[in-house]
């Protein structure tokens, strides 16, 4: 490792995602190449990583030594401004951010979809997260990087969302919208991206928030937004129908005015209280509130469409990039190009707060290299940890299971045969995906032709609710044959409608409303997964697989070989593929 600072020496940009939920870390080198990006929930196996700092002592020292060991200069970039907004500073002085203050809050209620004490609670968590950010890192830097020049930079939170969306896109110019729960001062931000530069156009101010609205909807449906269960609302929505009275109430609650959301304080609390009669009763099955979920999802979509349509008429680019937690709503994303005046759409693989770690690192790089050329193709999502070969070797030696070691093409053929015969397979190869979705490197795979497969995977592998669908990973070249108005969807970021004539061929991945949240797979983006699906296609005539994240409900996607074996041996998985080894519970299959 070089000692002493040289302005011409190698620089590494370390991005810290220091939000109280979904903390993450990212590394970018001095040429702008992304070296690594991963959410902390993976190595700690703690869903969403609530209250965990990104610079944890279990992973960061080794990570820095592996990727930044020869650095002369280390730039540490944060995803939040150093100075906190006035409301948070006021709330802190008033004692509202303490446990006693949260429990006894009697101040003025903000016109937000969540109660003010809950907003204070989240601000308290965020305040503490930012105070801790970098503390553990300081020990690592003193211990291992004593001769390296260190810089700290802090960025606007919504700008870090925009940076990943724009710099990670295949566009040279784009309109960028960030739709979030909250940033420094509001929930919305709009930018122009042109020739490697991001220019702010508008930031909203105040508690009006589509993110808060969806969190409230999640709570009314009987789910836990703190645990990230908004996914369940999206799945449940397909079972319901529009309730006109409820839709009118939502429209009264929040309306679009240009680039902003408006809530009339004179009627807001009355309208919000009226929603309580729709709340799912204790012990009632989720299906009893399917109309609530459907109507809330419909309102969310029409509101996003209105915001983005207003954005487009301002003369911005026809290429749209989306960031913020609301960009995870794949149902909304799937209809944007049909319902708004935009021509092309890019949503990054990690549009929520984990992605801001990489956004911050990219911003720091572009500050130092303002003339760096725009990316020519979308950023790969395969930026995380690799399979630990020594652990695979150890399990192969001592696990007592049937083990086969195969070269890539033989492994694809063998796995495709097993899938075609009804085996459910855990698949862990290459570097992990950055973001919440399994994209063929940390996946559970199954045959989509079996009409019982969705229920089987839900019941004996994932242990989750039966109303939740599974994703189709499809060879891109066959996308138009299977989906109406097909769009290339590399990160499982859009839900599209299956063509009616193919639905019976792949019933395990067709949701109740005829849709699927697809992943488009190409040989260029993922030659390994493309090879496997192609082998399955050769045997069955079907160019897609059922793909879901390699985890069980309530746990993050597996990180280590040990995590993978825990899921394999503790569930109904039949086969586990780790690197080039295939482990089987029943060798005669």
Image (tube, rainbow, N blue to C red):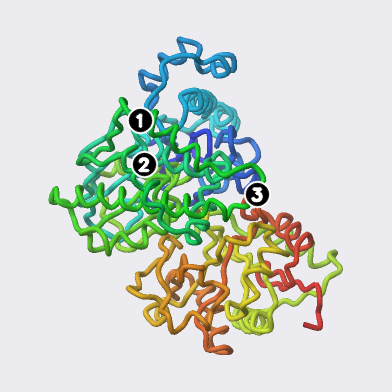
Q: In this view, does 561 lie to the left or right of 112?
A: right
State the residue at coordinates (41%, 41%).
211
State the residue at coordinates (27%, 55%).
320
Label 1 close to label 3 by CB (< 8 Å)? no
Which secondary structure, mark 2?
helix
Residue topped by disc 1: 268
Residue topped by disc 2: 249
State the residue at coordinates (49%, 14%).
106
Label 3 close to label 2 by CB (< 8 Å)? no
Q: In this view, does 154 lie above or below 350?
A: above
Counting labels gives 3
Q: Where is residue 182 in the image (x, y as percent from the top left)?
A: 39, 34
Q: Nearer the viewer, mark 1 or mark 3?
A: 1
Label 1 close to label 2 by CB (< 8 Å)? no
Whichever of callouts 1 and 3 sits on the residue coming sooner in the sequence is 1
Residue topped by disc 3: 554
Viewer-closest of 285 and 25: 285
Which secondary structure, mark 3?
loop
State the residue at coordinates (44%, 59%).
241
Q: Is residue 277 above or below residue 267?
A: below
**CA separation, marks 1 and 3?**
34 Å
Whichever of callouts 1 and 2 sits on the residue coming sooner in the sequence is 2
Q: In which quarter of the image is residue 551?
A: bottom right
């Amino acid at each position: 490792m070089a000692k002493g600072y040289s302005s011409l020496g190698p620089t590494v940009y370390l991005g810290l995602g220091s939000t109280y939920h979904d903390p993450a870390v990212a590394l970018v080198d001095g040429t702008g190449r992304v070296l690594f990006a991963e959410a902390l929930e993976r190595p700690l196996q703690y869903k969403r990583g609530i209250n965990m700092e990104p610079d944890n002592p279990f992973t960061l020292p080794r990570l820095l030594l592996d990727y930044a060991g020869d650095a002369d200069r280390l730039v540490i970039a944060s995803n939040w401004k150093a100075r906190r907004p006035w409301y948070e500073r006021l709330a802190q002085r008033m004692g509202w951010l303490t446990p006693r203050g949260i429990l006894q809050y009697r101040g003025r209620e903000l016109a937000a979809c969540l109660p003010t004490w809950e907003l204070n609670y989240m601000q308290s968590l965020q305040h503490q997260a930012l105070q801790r950010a970098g503390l553990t890192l300081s020990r690592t830097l003193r211990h291992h990087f004593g001769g390296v020049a260190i810089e700290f930079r802090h960025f606007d939170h919504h700008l870090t969302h925009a940076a990943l969306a724009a710099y990670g896109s295949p566009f040279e110019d784009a309109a960028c919208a960030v739709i979030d729960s909250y940033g420094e001062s509001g929930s919305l931000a709009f930018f122009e991206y042109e020739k490697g530069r991001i220019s702010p156009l508008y930031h909203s101010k105040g508690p009006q928030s589509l993110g808060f609205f969806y969190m409230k909807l999640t709570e009314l449906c009987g789910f836990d937004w703190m645990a990230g269960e908004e996914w369940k609302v999206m799945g449940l929505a397909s079972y319901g129908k529009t309730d006109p009275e409820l839709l009118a109430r939502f429209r009264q609650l929040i309306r679009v005015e240009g680039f902003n959301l408006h809530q009339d304080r004179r009627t807001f609390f009355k309208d919000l209280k009226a929603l309580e009669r729709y709340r799912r009763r204790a012990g009632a099955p989720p299906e009893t509130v399917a109309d609530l979920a459907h109507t809330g999802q419909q309102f969310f979509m029409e509101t996003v469409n209105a915001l983005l349509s207003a954005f487009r008429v301002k003369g911005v680019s026809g290429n749209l990039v989306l960031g913020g937690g609301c960009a995870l709503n794949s149902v909304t994303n799937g209809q944007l190009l049909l319902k708004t005046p935009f021509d092309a759409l890019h949503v990054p693989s990690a549009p929520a707060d984990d992605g801001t770690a990489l956004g911050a690192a990219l911003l720091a790089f572009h500050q130092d290299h303002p003339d760096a050329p725009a990316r020519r193709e979308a950023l790969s999502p395969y930026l995380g940890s690799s399979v630990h070969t020594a652990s695979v070797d150890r399990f192969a030696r001592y696990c007592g299971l049937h083990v086969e070691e195969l070269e890539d093409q033989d492994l694809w053929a063998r796995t495709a045969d097993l899938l075609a015969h009804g085996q459910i397979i855990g698949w862990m190869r290459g570097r992990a995906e950055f973001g919440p979705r399994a994209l063929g490197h940390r996946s559970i795979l199954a045959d989509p032709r079996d009409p019982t497969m969705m229920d089987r995977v839900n019941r004996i592998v994932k242990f989750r609710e039966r109303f939740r669908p599974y994703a189709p990973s499809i060879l891109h070249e066959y996308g138009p044959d299977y989906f109406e108005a097909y769009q290339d969807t590399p990160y499982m970021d859009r839900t599209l409608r299956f063509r009616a004539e193919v639905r019976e061929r792949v019933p395990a991945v067709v949701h109740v409303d005829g849709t699927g949240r697809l992943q488009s797979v190409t040989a260029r983006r993922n030659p390994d997964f493309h090879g496997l699906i192609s082998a399955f296609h050769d045997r069955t005539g079907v160019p897609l697989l059922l793909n879901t994240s390699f985890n069980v409900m309530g746990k993050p996607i597996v990180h280590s070989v040990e995590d993978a074996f825990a899921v394999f041996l503790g569930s109904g998985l039949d086969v586990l593929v780790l690197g080039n080894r295939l482990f089987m519970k029943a060798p005669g299959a």
